[in-house]
Amino acid sequence: MEIVKKVGSILSLITILLACKNNEVKQSESKIVHLITLDPGHFHAALVQKTMYNDVDSVVYVYAPAGNDVQLHLDRINGYNTRSENPTHWKEEVYTGNDFFEKMIAEKKGNVVVLSGNNHKKSEYILKSLENGFNVLADKPMVIDSKGFEELKQAFDIAAKNNLVLYDIMTERFEITSILQKELSMISEVFGELQKGTATDPAVVMESVHYFYKYISGNVVVRPGWFMDASQQGEGIIDVMTHLVDLVQWECFPEQTLDYNKDIQVNAAKRWATPMSLSQFKTITKLDSFPDYLKNNVKDTVLQVYSNGEINYQLKGVNARTYVIWNYKAPEGTGDTHHSILKGTKATLEIRQGADEQFKPVLYIEPTIKDTGYGNILVEKIKELQSKYPGIGIEKIKTGWKVTIPEKYNEGHEAHFARVTANFLSYLKNKNMPAWEVPNMLAKYYTTTKALEVATTSSSKH
């Protein structure tokens, strides 16, 4: 009798375990998205997973070559899983064979490929992933040259044909000062109309200053050696410039479809290098020497990193200038900065992030017309905006007004990755990506790749 009871207890336990297992499987199957991280060589790949998402399964499949890049990625994910405040619970299943990409295609364990790493093969990864039925969330830049742009055009055609989503990670659209600059530019009583400007005095100026030595999630970023190789990472005019060109399009022509064949004219572009000593290189890469692939860029023992660029172009007749600068390390107490100017017929909207702003982005409204009633109109329009952005206000200064923004809106760059990912997941689930997004992504990458052609041709003449 005792044996029968024991057998019965064991069977009951097995039944419970099987039920739990089946429940786990059902829960897993109920998730819409199963992530695959492909060759994560950039810390942005981990930032996509800094938070959890309702529709995303906690198991993430990682396919990458063995080495430091993938290990750093896994360490970052582990850091999110083990943090004391709001820890994540990702489970990383990793494959590091030499055939990692072919293995990913063959196994098809997920339905969304996250790409953030060495950009040399990114356009190929995007194209082949889409051809094999994967959706793609790609970090910028999706392409780093004109050849890649041609592949990107094919990729969007395949995505449309196969009902898949291809999207890039444009975090700067979620920076509150950029959002409010855009909002105010759409209020004709405040901004008037966007000026056309000239080549020497453009109506739109976007500048971004970045640093190789920086902190992410509380730690100094260890950068792979290839990050300093323009043929693998992409030049500055191709890489970070993507954000600036995107903001020009997004702010100046909101929700309008752009045609790169007729709406864009690149007038001039240039590129230049940031010098980096071996000691500086060692500090951020943990490598003892310059790899062979960088040797051609070393002059008198100093590495020349082509991370800086400027584009002067017209977008639908509006003259714009975008430029990116990379320095080695920010002065104490500072960090990456953004400067943005939109010139309207009634006011200039400018984001500054200098010493006067304590290196935090601040939006200014500077009227260019003499109208004693302008201030009253502005107050009324800010009140209307407060229904959408509670707590914002304005403060009178000598040259106009400073927009005051509650601290709750200053989420920071890292938090914006969750915002972009949430948008992507919504488009994936509801099939509602705005019609202008794809043509405007093409317009953006046409601008950057065309500018690189112009800059390279110009520099070779000197």
Image (cartoon, rainbow, N blue to C red):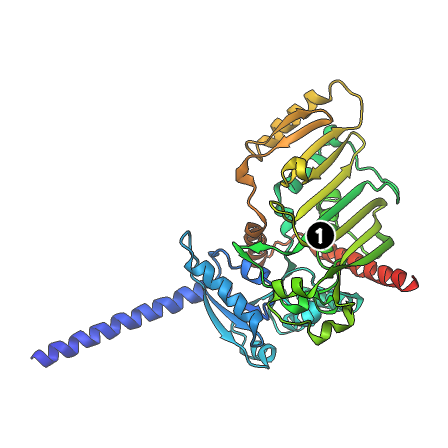
175 above or below 67?
A: above
- Judged from this view, the residue extending furthest toward the right is 461
For residue 96, which quarter of the picture?
Answer: bottom right
Crowding at dot 1, Cα within 10 Å, few <14 / some 14-19 / many 20+, comes out as: some
Query: x and y percent of residue 136 in the render?
Result: 62, 65
In the rendered image, the quadrant that contains the C terminus is bottom right
Report the residue at 66% width, 62% height from top: 280
Question: Could you tell me if residue 164 is visible in this image?
Answer: no
Q: Is residue 191 left or right of residue 407?
A: right
Q: Quadrant of residue 44?
A: bottom right
Q: Nearer the viewer, residue 107 or 339?
A: 339
Q: What residue is drawn where x is 74% and y is 52%?
A: 324
Amino acid, disc 1: Trp
Which of 63/20 is in front? 63
- Residue found at x 67% / y 69%: 226
Q: Which residue is mark 1?
A: 436
Question: How many marks are shown on the rendered structure?
Answer: 1
Place of residue 370 in the rendered image (x, y in percent of width and height, measured from the top left): 80, 21
Q: Work out which residue is located at the far left of the displayed protein and give it.
A: 1
At x 71%, y 76%, the residue is: 292
Q: Residue 109, position in %: x, y?
A: 51, 73
Q: Secondary structure at mark 1?
A: loop
From the viewer's side, name the closer residue of 142 and 213. 213
318 displayed left or right of 421: right
Q: Quadrant of the N terminus?
A: bottom left
For residue 96, above or below residue 19: below
Q: Is residue 197 visible?
A: yes
10 up-or-down from 148: above or below: below
Query: Percent x, y for residue 134?
Result: 60, 69
> Residue at the top extreme?
372
